[in-house]
Structure formats: structure tokens, C-alpha cells
Amino acid sequence: MKKIGVIGSGFSGCIIANELAKTGKYIIDIYEARHHIGGNCYTEKDPETGVMVHAYGPHIFNTSKKDIWDYVNTLTSFKPYINRVKAVTDKGIFPLPINLRTINLFFGENFTPAEAETFIDSLADKTIADPQSFEEQALRFVGKALYENFFKGYTLKQWGIHPQHLPASILKRLPVRFTDDDNYYNSTYQGIPTSGYTPIFQKLLDHPHITLHLNKKFTRQTHGAAHDYIFYSGPIDAYFDYKIGKLQYRTLRFERHTQEGSFQGSAVVNYCQQEIPYTRISEHKFFTPWEHHTQTVYFKEYSSLAQDNDTPYYPIRLLDDKALLEAYEKLAVEEKKVSFMGRLGTYRYLDMDVVIAESLDIASKCATLPMEQWPTFPQSTSK
């Protein structure tokens, strides 16, 4: 039987390991640098309050792909969950995404949907014909007042870069609705695992042909030579020992607080003012409203540029990063018997359902193709 090394125990690594193990053709070793499985989706019970905590920030599963929704429901039970986010601005607290209620509250009006759409269009800066930056896109999309209150300060804190230097594509993910719909996502299927995300990964790894190695950092020299093939979901630049430079990531720091009762009465509140150092506060017992807790635990979230020992969260993907990524991708294609996967391995911002779909797709190809033809990257990798 061929020996497969899988680096990382998030969705990418665990799905690949599970799918290959089920073929009966492979022995799989998973190497995880942390003390736990699940990557940034890891959940655990808070020891003081008993609340299920998303250890690396909130993860609300959402997808419009029925096959992916059906797949994750074979791994654990989900309960419906609608993510309703609030935004604290200089003018008060409002629902996000910006919707009809937000517009009426913010401007002190009582617009109908059609009136609100006309009004927002009147605020748009039509001198910007082809927005190139985040700032230009916002000004062209919603006008100065909404941009400065909801987006400018938050973006400066989240990315550490002025919105005029960020690509317009970042803002295109944020909708404006002319209804009272305050569901943060547009996806058809939305939910949170009843017992948290960790049982998903436990089930994926529960196979006699899979051996898990926690607190084990991967090295090409040690682990690469010991296996017939490697699936790598760590940072692509780290795989090559940063030989041509480091890609930039944002990292997060979480400041934990507990108290009796509730702190903010909802799961997520964004703080849009630049002078407030944290970007948002998440109160985790509201992610499991089917549970009952007398105490609460909440986390203030701080964003900063990732340093050597930090957990990377968000690829920055500015022009310099993209040029460096292309250079690493050329090295990756030349590398023999290695596939690069997931958010870190492909240096993309990916939602959970995309990671799952790509991992299942690669596993399907590996089941039918000879090892020499296994894909270096997921087919849907975008430049």
C-alpha cells in the first residue's frame, strides 16, 4: 500500500485523508503542528462557562451547493442558524449588511424599498466610472457617509491598509439590500454543527488506515522522503522555506472575557470606528441558542500583520504578494508528488464550502488517475 503524508488537519487534510483511506489503497499519516485537529474551525467547551467556543473566531457554515450541504450533514448534525450582525458607528448601532432598516435608521427616514434605492443612488459618486480601489468602489456604491461610518475605520483595522490601497474586489463581497433582510449571508443553506465542528474532523479521521500525529511540524527533508505522496495545506511559502520571500497574512488576537448573564445580547457586533482598537466582539453562547448557560464568554478581536510565530488567517494578496505567489506556484508545479490545498496552500481567502468542494474534487481525481497525474492545485484555483 502506498504511503501518503497529509500536512494539516483542517477540512482539506481531513477530507483527503478520509477519501483516500476509504479506497483501501493507501496508508495515511496526518501531521498537525498544533495540539488539536480541525485547523481554524476547531471548537471546544469553555472550561469556565460551558459555552461552545469557536477557538479561532466565529464559523457559520453557509453554502448554496446542495451536494456540499448534504455531505457535511453526513458527518454531523446541524441546526439552522442565521448570522445577524450589528455595527457600532459614530451615529449609533445598526444592522449589517446595510439594508432598508439600516438606511432608514441611519438617515432618519422612512423610505420604501424603491425610495431607498433611489436615495442611495443619489449619494453615489458618479464621477468614479471604473472603481479600482476599495475606497473608490465604496464611494461609487454607497456614497461618503455610509463609507466613512461603516467601512473606512473597520477596513483600516482589519487590513492595516488604507482602503484606497486595497482592491475594489474586497468590497464587492458586501451587499446592500433594499429590504429588511438582515441575514449576513445569501446562501441557501446555513447552520452550525449541534456539537461544534470538532466532531466532524474526529469522524473523518476515524479510519484504521489513518494515523494522526499532533504537535508535529512538517519538514520536506524528514516527512517528504518517507511518503510516496504529500498533500500540503500549510503556507505555500513555508513549504519552500521562504526561499524567495514571505507572503503577507493578517492574523487575529482574541481577548477573552466572562461574566454572568449576557454581555451584548447577540453573537457578533462590529466596531467600525478607527479609534476603537478591536474590530468586533463575538459572544459565543449565541452561536448555540439551543443551549442554556447562566454565564457568558465573549472575545474582543484584534487584527494585525502576521509575524513569524502568529497564526495566519487572511492572505493579503496585494500586487507584490500576487507576484510572489506566482513565483511559488512555478516552484510548486516543478515539485514532484505534492499537492497544495486549502486557504494557506493556495494563498486564497476561501469559505468552508469551497475548501470542502475542492478537497472532494481532488480526492475524486486521485481515485481515478495514476499518482503521476494527481493535480498540483485544486482545479478552481483563481489567480
Image (cartoon, grey):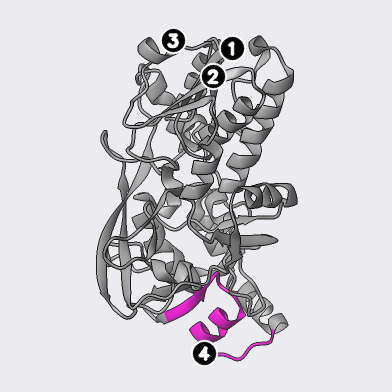
Q: Amino acid at mark 2?
A: Ile
Give the CA separation, mark 3 to mark 4.
66 Å
- Return the x and y of residue 64 as percentages of the image width and height: 70, 55
- Return the x and y of residue 280 as percentages of the image width and height: 37, 65
Give the CA separation, mark 2 to mark 3.
12 Å
Which label's residue is closer to the chain start, 1 or 3?
1
User: Where's the C terminus, which quadrant?
Assistant: top right
Looking at the rendered structure, which numbered label has been put on residue 1? 1
Could you classify mark 3 by the number of other residues whose Cα lies within 10 Å: few (under 14), some (14-19), or many (20 or more)?
few
Give the CA separation, mark 2 to mark 4.
64 Å
Specify the quadrant of the image occupied by residue 311. top left
Q: Secondary structure at mark 1?
A: loop
Q: Amino acid at mark 1?
A: Met
Magenta span of residues: 93-112
Which residue is tagged 3?
226
* Residue 105 lies in the magenta stretch: yes
- Return the x and y of residue 1 as percentages of the image width and height: 59, 12
Could you classify mark 1 by the number of other residues whose Cα lies within 10 Å: few (under 14), some (14-19), or many (20 or more)?
few
Q: Is residue 41 above or below residue 217?
A: below
Which residue is tagged 4?
108
Which label's residue is closer to the chain start, 2 or 3?
2
